[in-house]
Amino acid sequence: MILAAAALLTVGAILFTLLIRSSDLPEPEPVSPTRHLEERKAAIYENLRDLQFEFRLGKLSSTDYEQSKLGLQKELAAVGTEIDRVAGKRKAAPVAFELPKTCPHCGAKFDKPMKFCGECGKSMTGGAA
């Protein structure tokens, strides 16, 4: 009886494996074009942390530390530039934000822009103080 149950379980497992449809499988994760660059960037940051730790322990001289640090920073800058190039990122221009001269809560008017109202004390940007 145990042998029959084991055989039935084995046949069921084999049939289940063979009859799985590809539509039942989860979608594979898309491969990022910058994945290897992101991994390299993380490795450089780790190397910089290790370098600083060894310098603090006194294992490196000041000149060796500065030279190694500069080399890693240059490599990090190159990797960052490559990530931006591959990803097609463009740095957005900073948005100029003008503070209001009139309080949206109490309507008090001021000569210059302010973060908080001088009358009611609430935020001039519309949020709570």
Image (spheres, grey):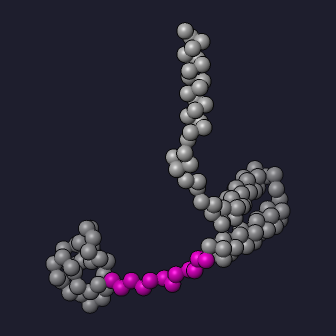
Q: Quadrant of residue 107 in the image?
A: bottom left
Q: Is residue 76 left or right of residue 6?
A: right
* x, y percent for residue 39: 68, 59
* x, y percent for residue 45: 68, 60
Secondary structure mostly seen in magenta is loop
Question: Relative to residue 110, is residue 15 depicted above or below?
Answer: above
What residue lies at 33% left-to-right and 83% top-to-bottom?
99
Q: Is residue 42 left or right of residue 122?
A: right
Question: Relative to residue 64, is residue 16 depicted above or below?
Answer: above
* x, y percent for residue 77: 70, 72
Question: Relative to residue 12, is residue 81 depicted above or below?
Answer: below
Residue with the most extreme left position: 106
Q: From which residue to which does the magenta span run?
A: 88-99
What residue lies at 20% left-to-right and 87% top-to-bottom?
109
* x, y percent for residue 5: 55, 16
Task: Pick the quarter of the image with the C terminus.
Answer: bottom left
Task: Pick the quarter of the image with the N terminus.
Answer: top right
What residue lies at 60% left-to-right and 24% top-to-bottom?
10
**37 drawn magenta:** no
Question: Relative to residue 123, is residue 44 depicted above or below?
Answer: above
